Amino acid sequence: MENSVDVQSEITSQSLNHNNYRQLPNEHRSENADKIIFFYTFFLSLIMFATVPFAIIITHETDFWANVFKIMTTPCKLVTDYFALAGLGSTFFNAGVCGFICNLIMVISKIKPSATTFAGYMLVLAHCFYGLNFVNMLLPLLGVFVYCKVMKKSYRANFHISLFATAVGPFISDFLFRYTINNTYVFGEPRVTVLGVILAVLFGLGSGFVIPALLPGTTAMHRGYNMYKAGLAIGIYGIFVYAFMYKTLGVDAPSVIPFDNPEYYSMPYKYRGFVSVFLIFLFTFTVFLGYFLNGKNFHGYRALIHSTGYGLDFLDKFGMPVCLINIGIYGLCAVAYLNVIFVLPEIFPFLPEGAGFTGSTIGATFAALTFAADGQHPRNVWPIVAGYGLLFVTMITLCTIFELEIPWTLSSQSYINGIAFATGLCTFAGKYGWKIGIAVGFFGAIICTSTTAMHGGFVLYNGGFTAGLTALVVLPILDFYNIKPKYKDDEYTH
């Protein structure tokens, strides 16, 4: 009991010291962060629109508006590659519209964007390439707004939750276009029923009341070690909805719709050149923007990458210009990683062919940057990535010993998407060191392809859900064996 009191006193003391640290005027660097976040997110929305004509010219997409309509009206459970479903130009257009809707709400509601606002925006933008569109995102957004009005809560303070709630978008699309007609659904011939609209509206509005209630409890479960906090909450919610609407009621669980796009599937690495150039330009510009806004220097970035990332608001401690530098450098690292794993099957022919730059891949790239202003940086992320690599080597070794066919490679779509969200476990590496970080990445990689079945593929934050489950397993083991964190924040200041 005495030890418990001592521990509590130490935690309280550290908390007070941390709060005092953050209140020092010369350490509070979040001035104008809201304006910079709005400018940068608006820039991202605009660049999606600006990319559309180039994408159309390069891919010869002649049926652009028909493809946009196809994106809006097609059921889109994981993983629905919008590049394959529609086209490159129409997918970027969808991303631009969805991003602009977020920007418009910020303006109308007079929201001061924060690190969590930026995270929510990035997740919306990411999933616009594989499952989210400007039809199925509206009802979850409205649901949280209605929740705030009914419960007399500030929508400005809960705007980020409405962005997170869009993760249930595939449920909305399914209720609107497939659920009530089920086996008679025909791809390319959307039919909307009154019952389908009612189910979609009830579910969208209801989600606005359920998701905010789940978030605090699930965050407490993993103690903040899963940066994709909403992933665990919405994943659990999705399990119950899927189990009831399909398994309990005996409705056939739908599969991912196959698309007849032979030209797209004939390309082994899809739009590798175009997307690589686009991402390199975007992230290089982001680095220079941060550099310019930071007084034409990189001051503060070295301290940022030496922080653990746990429980830190990078905006407050380092300022948004330094965060932009982090976003750009981290993004360039992600592009380099993707291009390396894409050539592995070429170097080692015994490996299965990878996915390449699909819609899901570019979406996963943006998703990996979600918390680059709130805890993620290359130094605490690389051990998680190395954990995936360790599982890859282990799998190849065991398959060779037992003469089994090698089932996947690092560039398989499910593992690209999985690792994007597994980066949310980076605080394990930051707090416990790189060895624990690699182990956590290894365990997360084991289950990343199995969790989709739990919610039927209707939750877009499957990677965040996987990361949350991993944290729930790892934390009790660390506690049981009395493995303590090795590093604290604020130790590195220069």
Image (cartoon, rainbow, N blue to C red):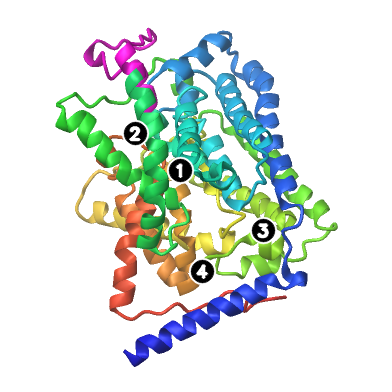
Along the polypeptide, which appears first: circle 4 or circle 3? 3
**Magenta highlight range:** 171-197
In this rendering, does residue 267 appear at all?
A: no
The amino acid marked with disc number 4 is Gly
Q: How far apart are the two marked residues, 4 and 1, measured between alpha carbons?
A: 38 Å
Task: Assign the N terminus to one quadrant of the image.
Answer: bottom left
Q: Residues within 10 Å of mark 4 (few under 14, many from 20)?
A: many
Residue 250 vs residue 428, the one in the foreground: 250
Task: Assign the C terminus to one quadrant of the image.
Answer: bottom right
Along the polypeptide, which appears first: circle 1 or circle 3? 1
Along the polypeptide, which appears first: circle 4 or circle 1? 1
Nearest to the eye among marks 4 and 1: give it.
1
Residue 462 located left or right of residue 273: left
Residue 51 located left or right of residue 9: right
- Where residue 68 appears, as percent x and y from the top left, is 53, 15
Q: Residues within 10 Å of mark 2 (few under 14, many from 20)?
A: many
- Where residue 63 appears, as percent x and y from the top left, is 55, 8
The amino acid marked with disc number 2 is Phe
- Where residue 56 appears, as percent x and y from the top left, is 63, 17
Report if the CB atoms under discs 4 and 1 are less than 8 Å apart: no
Which SS class for mark 1?
loop
**What number is the disc on residue 458?**
2
**Residue at label 1?**
151
Task: Give above or below for 408 relative to 322.
Answer: above
Which SS class for mark 2?
loop
**What number is the disc on residue 315?**
3
- Where residue 275 appears, as percent x and y from the top left, is 60, 33
Q: How far apart are the two marked residues, 1 and 3, measured between alpha carbons?
A: 29 Å
